[in-house]
Image: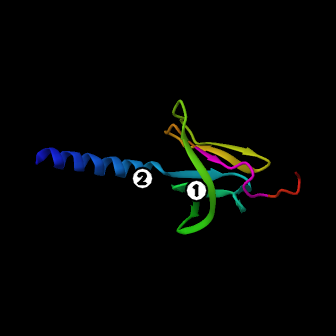
Amino acid sequence: MKLKGLIFGMGTVALAVASAAGNYNLELTQPTWVGNTQLKPGTYKVATQGSTAVFTSGKKTVAEAPVSVQQGTHKVSSTEVETSNSKIQEIRPAGTKSRLIFSPGAGGDTSAH
């Protein structure tokens, strides 16, 4: 009986850690596209919900974009954002091995292509 309680307790802790691991803070210093939305400079919370990244500012959802989450080979000490033509391609959150990879053709101003 104690073993069942221990296993259930460990499962609950792992679930809490996993859900906390999907929320990240992000500071943008210039206008940047994610999905079909241009984000203004500022601080955003990024949460992964399945295959979607949800960007919020305060309590308001400001953008959603398709994302895949992969594990990198090492933890990064500060959040890294990779962009191409002002579009977010990848986010590597501080203190994690996680890599949030955005679809290359998702949103943004495509008139230059």
Q: Are marks 2 and 1 in contact (CB under 8 Å)?
A: no
Q: Residue at x 58, y 64 (%)?
A: 57
**Res 38 quadrant in image:** bottom right
The outermost residue toward the right is 112
> Hey, what amino acid is under mark 2?
Ser
Residue 87, compared with residue 63, is above or below; it is: above
**Nearest to the observer: residue 39 or residue 10:** 10
* Residue 11 position within the rendered picture, expressed as x and y whole percent measured from the top left: 29, 48
Q: Main secondary structure of the magenta part?
A: loop
**Which element type, helix, strand or loop, lies under badge 1?**
strand
Start and end of the magenta stretch?
A: 100-108
Residue 101, compared with residue 74, is above or below; it is: below
Left or right of 46 in this view: 29: right
Marker count (numbered): 2
> Hey, what amino acid is under mark 1?
Ala
Q: Residue at x 54, y 66 (%)?
A: 58
The outermost residue toward the left is 1
**Which element type, helix, strand or loop, lies under badge 2?**
helix
The residue pinned by badge 1 equals 53
**Nearest to the observer: residue 111 or residue 91:** 111
Alpha carbons under labels 2 and 1: distance apart: 13 Å
